[in-house]
Image (spheres, helix red, strand yellow):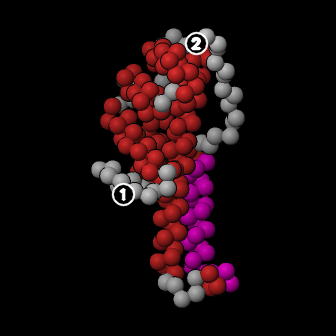
Amino acid sequence: MATPDKVSFSGQHRSLEDVALYYLDARAAFIDFFAGSSPELQLRYAGAKLDVVRDIALKELDLTSCLSVLTTVEAAVRIDYLSRVYARKKDQLSLAMREIYKGRENAAKLEDDLLRAWRDSGVVGRNLIGELIGAFKYRHWLAHGRYWSPKFGRIYDYVTVYGLAEEFLEAMEQY
């Protein structure tokens, strides 16, 4: 069996702080734009209730920012996974990751393989992993065009998703 190619990390992944700054800047820009009287605003939204249009734009920002937060978490988990494998670390979590790599190589499943390994290691609480997996179901819905009516069992928004991501990434860093 051929040795799998190592993934070459691009360095283009974003930090959670990058996503947060973008979200805050874009939110402030939307609020300023819809509070102003620019020709673009007047032309584009002539006759519309600006507070309604602003709220729609802010909701879309919330949705796309949730997607960015969760892709940031996925990148962190996958980089951690491959780094543990490539470094041939010997701790319990790294050994579990190396076992996953034997079967799946670079195609490990985020929820079924990698997050399960984090959960089983005891490093991150089961509840947090469960909530994060739920948030990834939300991400799937966002990424695939939001064309079906989802049943998540809870409401997700930027603040909730960011909080889950922050808590998980902090737990990862502690290990």
- Mark 1 residue crowding within 10 angstroms, few (<14) / some (14–19) / many (20+): few
Q: Position of residue 83 (x, y in %)?
A: 60, 22
**Which of the numbered marks, if any, corresponds to residue 88?**
2
Which image quadrant is residue 82 in? top right
Residue 29: within the magenta? yes
Look at the image and tell me in which quarter the N terminus lies: top right
Q: Position of residue 28 (x, y in %)?
A: 58, 66
Q: Position of residue 123 (x, y in %)?
A: 40, 25
Residue 80: within the magenta? no
Residue 116 vs residue 22, the one in the foreground: 116
Residue extending farthest left: 153
Query: In front: mark 1 or mark 2?
Result: 1
Q: Which residue is mark 1?
A: 149
Q: Magenta residues?
A: 18-41
Task: Please give the name of the residue rendered at 56% of the width and 57% of the height, measured from the top-left corner.
Answer: 23
- Could you tell which of marks 1 and 2 lies nearer the N-terminus? 2
- Mark 2 residue crowding within 10 angstroms, few (<14) / some (14–19) / many (20+): few
Q: Is residue 126 above or below residue 49?
A: above
Q: Is residue 120 above or below residue 60?
A: above
Task: Please give the name of the residue rendered at 62% of the width and 85% of the height, measured from the top-left corner.
Answer: 42
Amino acid on which the number 2 mark rests in the picture: Arg
- Residue 164 visible: no
For the stretch drawn in magenta, what is the main secondary structure?
A: helix
**Which of the numbered marks, if any, corresponds to residue 6?**
none
Amino acid on which the number 1 mark rests in the picture: Ser
Which image quadrant is residue 12 in? top right
